[in-house]
Amino acid sequence: MRKSKTMSDYDDMVKLIIKRLRKRGFSQVSGYNRFRYMCETEKAIILLREKGTEARIPLAKIAAAIEAVRQEPAIYDKGPSALRKYGITHINSPLWSLLNLLSKAELML
């Protein structure tokens, strides 16, 4: 039986994603667009899309995407559109690329 996840578990995962993003400077899954790290606020990170527009990714949405992968691990491999089922739209591509900064096994911890 899997232990229930607390909010701090998700916060820790979000912090790890942001740490890797800062270190790498961008997030990108092979064959998909690259999203460059710009800055962060208390509640969001700002990425620069390849076309030059900014994508504001709320930290709460990152936590929601982690939960989606934990509920349905296939999302990790399916691509950004798989997040739509969980109410994540407009930022699904950059958000999915952020998830892929961690391995599927790390996300499932």
Image (cartoon, rainbow, N blue to C red):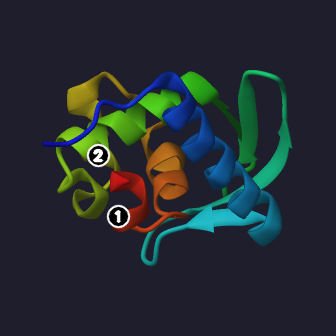
Report whether residue 49 is seen: no
Q: Secondary structure at mark 1?
A: helix
Q: Is residue 41 rendered to the left or right of residue 21?
A: right
**Front one among 98 and 70:** 70
Whether 82 is drawn above or below 4: the answer is: below
Q: Is residue 51 rendered to the left or right of residue 42?
A: left
How busy is the neighbourhood of tag 1: few (under 14 within 10 Å), some, or many (20 plus)? some
Q: In the orientation shown, which residue stands out farthest toward the bottom?
A: 30
The N terminus, quarter of image:
top left
Residue at x-position 56% and y-position 67%? 28
Residue at x-position 27% and y-position 32%? 84
Q: Which mark is residue 69?
A: 2
The C terminus, quarter of image:
bottom left
Residue at x-position 84% and y-position 47%? 38
**Front one among 32 and 18:** 18
Q: Where residue 76 sits: x, y (%)?
A: 30, 58
The residue to which callout 1 is attached is 104
Q: Where residue 47 sits: x, y (%)?
A: 72, 45
Would you say the residues marked 2 and 1 are in contact, meaning their CB atoms lie under 8 Å apart?
yes
Report whether residue 36 is seen: yes
Q: Where residue 43 sits: x, y (%)?
A: 73, 21
Q: Is residue 73 rendered to the left or right of residue 63?
A: left
Q: Amino acid at mark 2?
A: Val
Q: Amino acid at mark 1?
A: Lys
